[in-house]
Amino acid sequence: MKKNKTRKIAIVVDELTRLGGAEKVLKTLLSDYPDATVFTSYSDSKFVKKEFPKVKVKNSFIQYIPFSKQFNRELLLLHPLAYRSFSFIGYDLVISISAGFGKFIKPWFGTKHILYCLTPPRFLWLKDSRSTKKSKKFSYKIYSLFMGTFLEKIWQNWDRKAARKATKVVTISETVRERAQEVYGVDSEVIYPPVDVEKIKLNEDNDSREKWFLYHGRLERYKGVHLAIAACAMTHTPLKISGVGNELDELQQMVLDYNAKGLVKFLGRLEDEEVYDLMYKCKGLIFPVKDEDFGIVPVEANAAGAPVIAFKSGGSKETVSEDHPKSGIFF
């Protein structure tokens, strides 16, 4: 009897440069499909070697453009072409994990495509998430030239068509399911992203908690870090900020403007174990993201026993409940 051929699977991600929610989803998928090939627009070799040492990663032509790492945002508009250039001949299944243009792939005839939609691209669809008006960064100024014009409509149409071509769409929360229905006109199934709470130590003794708050996540304007800084600076409340991102310089200047140096501390990029230790000790976690897609961080904080102060919108409303005071409160 002829043996069944092993399925050949590809996993597509928007980029592979730092550890976040999408990368944790990727790790979970790779635990189920260890022989899968990962396709991405570009990657950081040191990061891949550390976090995905045994994984076969294929980069697009963007990886080989001089200074692509330094100008990753300026090259973002090339990403759709980069993903369209990949060949999936011989693959039985392609799974794209996308909050951007990873969904723009062109699977071979008969190849199934499952889109795990983290969110429709924020800079295209979520107007309130944009940083162009307040940011001095060159990349944002480029985007501002076509936002609100017919060019933006063209990009939105391309993005909508890419999502609709997927064999099946899966979303990470009810928030994103509704968002995908509104902007793409597609029905989707919700599968929440993985959160490994078993490895997080629980602290139920509130008296042992220290008198400072924690923000953990990427340092981007849409994450609302500036709200946490302003609130803590104005109330003279100590705040520790864990994470890195494109807004670091502007946020550090904001701390100086508030004369809050020493009160607000930037800890940089930390390992998971270090973050969980902070969650074990802090008075609470501030999660100031408006319209968050899901929000793994509040779940991790609750697993450590830390209550959450969250912006009342988006995925936060699916994980934080004021009916359970230990979970947190909204603002």
Image: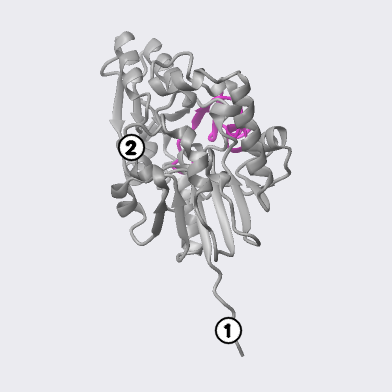
Q: Which amino acid is tagged 1?
A: Lys
**Mark 1 or mark 2, which is nearer the start of the sequence?**
1
- Work out which quarter of the rendered image holds the C terminus and state it: top right
User: Seen in the image, is 123 located left or right of residue 52?
Assistant: right
Query: Is the residue 107 above or below the residue 307 in the image?
Result: below
Q: Which amino acid is tagged 2?
A: Lys
Residue occupying image coordinates x 45% and y 48%: 40
User: Seen in the image, is 287 located left or right of residue 19?
Assistant: right
User: Decide: marks 2, 1 in contact (CB < 8 A)?
Assistant: no
Residue hosting label 2: 69
Location of residue 270 by image quarter: top left
Q: Helix or strand or loop: what does disc 1 sit on?
A: loop
Residue occupying image coordinates x 71% and y 32%: 182
Q: Which stretch is magenta?
A: 302-331
- Work out which quarter of the rendered image holds the N terminus and state it: bottom right
Residue 96 image offset from top left, x and y in percent: 55, 50
Residue occupying image coordinates x 39% and y 18%: 229
Q: Helix or strand or loop: what does disc 2 sit on?
A: loop
Measured in 3D between alpha carbons, the distance from the residue under mark 2 to the one under mark 1, in whole angstroms, is 45 Å
Nearer to me, 4 or 208:
4
Residue hosting label 1: 3
Query: Is the residue 34 above or below the residue 154 in the image?
Result: below
Dominant secondary structure, magenta: loop
Residue 159 image offset from top left, x and y in percent: 62, 37
Does any portion of residue 85 appear in the rendered image?
yes
Residue 314, numbered circle: none
Report crowding for label 2: few under 14, some 14 to 19, many 20 or more residues within 10 A (C-alpha). some
Report crowding for label 1: few under 14, some 14 to 19, many 20 or more residues within 10 A (C-alpha). few
Location of residue 152 by image quarter: top right
